[in-house]
Image (cartoon, rainbow, N blue to C red):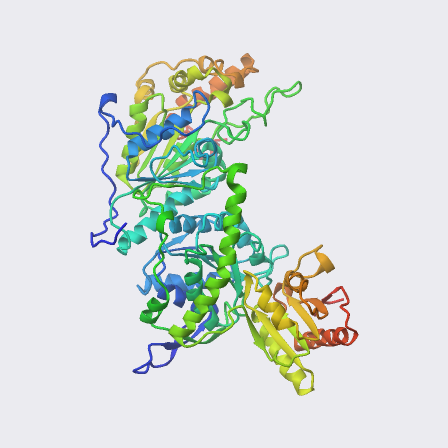
Amino acid sequence: MAVVTQAATAASDEKELLISGSEAVAEALTLADIDVVTAYPIRPYDTVMQAIAKKIANGQLVAEYIVAEGEHSQFEIVKHASTVGARVFAGSSGVGWAYAMECLVVTPPLRVPMLALVGNRALDDPGAFGVEHNDALFVRDLGWMLCWIDTSQEALDTTLIGYRIAEDRRVFLPLAISADGAFLTHSQALTLVPSKQKVDRFLPAYNRGDLQLHPDNPITVAPQANEDWVIEIRRQNDEAMKRAYTVIEEAYADFRRVFGRGPENPWFEEYMTDDAEVVLIGMGTISLPIKVAIREMRAQGKKVGLLRLRWFRPFPYERLVTALSKAQAIGVIDRNYSFGSPFASGVVANEVRAAMYNAERRPPLISFISGLGGREVMLDDVKKATDICYAAARSGQSDAKTHWLGVRD
Amino acid sequence: MAETTTTFTNATQVLEPFRGIKKVTIEEYFTSGHRTCQGCESALVMKLMVKAAGPRTIVLGSTGCMYVANTTYYTTPWVVPWMHTQLGSSGSAALGTAAGLKALMAKGKIKAEPINVIAFCGDGGGADMGIGAISATLTHKEYNSLILLYDNESYANTDIQISGMSPYGAHTTFSPPGKVHRIIHKRWKKNMAGMMAAGHPECRYVATVCASFAVDMMNRVRRALTIGGPTFIHSLDPCPKGWDYDPMLSHELGELAIETGVFPLYEVEDGQLKYYGKTRAIVDGRKRKPVREYLLKQGRFAHFIEEDLAYFQAKVDEMWEKWEIPAVVPFRRLDATKSVLDVK
């Protein structure tokens, strides 16, 4: 339930609402005047569709609202709507995202700038509603941009910024915004909702240009290319993803200019890292227990900081190397798994390892897996991880294995 | 594509039927550039389909022969805008494209005008993998689109494998006759058009067509696009490669499929069934040709013995003599002399 907690002041063109992460995304979609949205039920992302359905029913949002018969169709419908020039939105969670996989695969090479909300959820089996990041990570190699958000405010802001980035002709790639199931999709926080006028100053209309499918522009899209052209088309995707670095920087800078808030560093949030000997890395709402633990450990004299990774694709490897090089040890806490990977680590740990490989100074990196299936990450888990990192800092050596935190032995 | 103040009404184009072959428009919207097989009836279906629809049309093509053989990069035969969709996605492609156009026109973001949306699928993409999405689309009555299923009775692009639409006993690479099992494919073909018509009460138009009768076929396309909402057409397309016959016989086999009663021609408009063409003659009492005249012209049935031909004939007889609505709806009327509980 959205509750207005503060009457709009005369000068203010923002209102402040107590809303969940999913509801915040729905607010942004209304401001972005999306044209076509497709829904299919699966927890926990579906709360965004419930919020959208209410807005449609109440006339706050005018859009074609289609309840599909499965996630495959859900994503295929908006893909096609986008190619005729419509601004579109879809989303899913866990195995629902997996069911849509074929359609997720074709979206980047078609240069369809759709936005999707992934309410991160553990994959079946066994059944679990709780968060794991493996669902969204399915598409990490395919040309989807991926980011993880932490608060309702970030959910709203990132949705607006996301359309600006995805629909930039230099990019034209889809973006999946990941929100931790329950911890963010269902948790309410005070959120500033800007005015439509302000949003219109920031977010131009979607213009598909000469790629628009229309009788006035009779193009053939996605023909059979085979070995004659496929590698060139892959390369175009690669270039678009590389251009996204600049476009993302520009979009956040412009967002700050128009709205007067938002991070200076789009890529990651740094918390008490200035003097940190140990830097912990995580994505999403895991930041909360980590920040609390850091404050407690700082009171005991341990110089610990957090680097919360916001953007995963494109991966901010250069900024990350700069930020991490001064640490004595790095601890990556993954809320995902990658069975059989190097060091049996999670995905983020190995991405950071790869990013650091050419760095002049490579602090020891310790890999942790925690919080799978929605299990809470406890303060003691974070403190234990920090102790292991300190041991590595003292020895100057990584232990080359992955520690699972908070698991029954 | 400029903005306009024209009021959006969600109307369709009014496409009057062609009154005979000489009245058919001369413009082609599916031209050279494709590389379909000699005698390919499905390529003709594409050509006639879009000829019937005209230039203000968007065509979506799901994976299959009519994708792979028709849209080699840089040599597209499509004069109208065309886009690929995934194998099971003809329904979603039609729905998404129509919804996108409707949203943009209703909001004045593009000019309001009726644009035909046609999504085609093969029998594998349509009747097997994509049936759920087609079914869903046929319930969305506010979106104008036509889904055309070109049925060449196998996965013909991938080396000829059985689909849910392959006829009983057909020899395909997934159903080769062997020393122990003469018949591998023992399933009877799905009744796709009947199922779509019966299962979607708000779908205003379902038809079967065969390009052996080109004007009839084009007029069914024009009717489907004119009547609006989601519509469905099932086309039977003889396939020289998959059915194993001389390419010169494509038209003749299409005619035989209808004359033997294996494939009926009919349309269901607003719930009212109308047989047409040579099927109408059968309903009116003309004798059906024996199915062997149709089957034995095709190499895919070369392994059939008399027993198989008799089985096939009996199943087709059943369609016409036992079905509540002959060759359309396979329900059987209860024997009035028995109570419901007596029926086994």
Q: Quadrant of residue B306?
A: top right
Q: Is residue A376 among the parts visible in the rendering?
A: no
Residue B86 image position (x, y, % from top left): 47, 42
Residue B308 image position (x, y, % from top left): 54, 17
- B223 sits left or right of B262 in the view: left
Q: Residue at x 76, y 66 (%)?
A: A409
Q: Is residue A244 among the parts visible in the rendering?
A: yes
Residue B8 image position (x, y, % from top left): 23, 51
Q: Residue furthest front?
A: A360
- A225 sits left or right of B174 in the view: left
Q: Residue at x 72, y 57 (%)?
A: A342
How many marks the image carries: the answer is 0
Q: Quadrant of the N terminus of chain A?
A: bottom left
- B225 sits left or right of A91 in the view: left
Residue A351 image position (x, y, % from top left): 64, 61
Q: Residue at x 48, y 27 (%)?
A: B153
Q: Quadrant of residue A24?
A: bottom left
Is B202 or A47 nearer to us in this picture? A47
Q: Residue furthest right?
A: A395
| Residue B231 position (above or below residue A247) | above
| Residue A339 position (above or below residue A296) | above
Q: Quadrant of residue B15?
A: top left
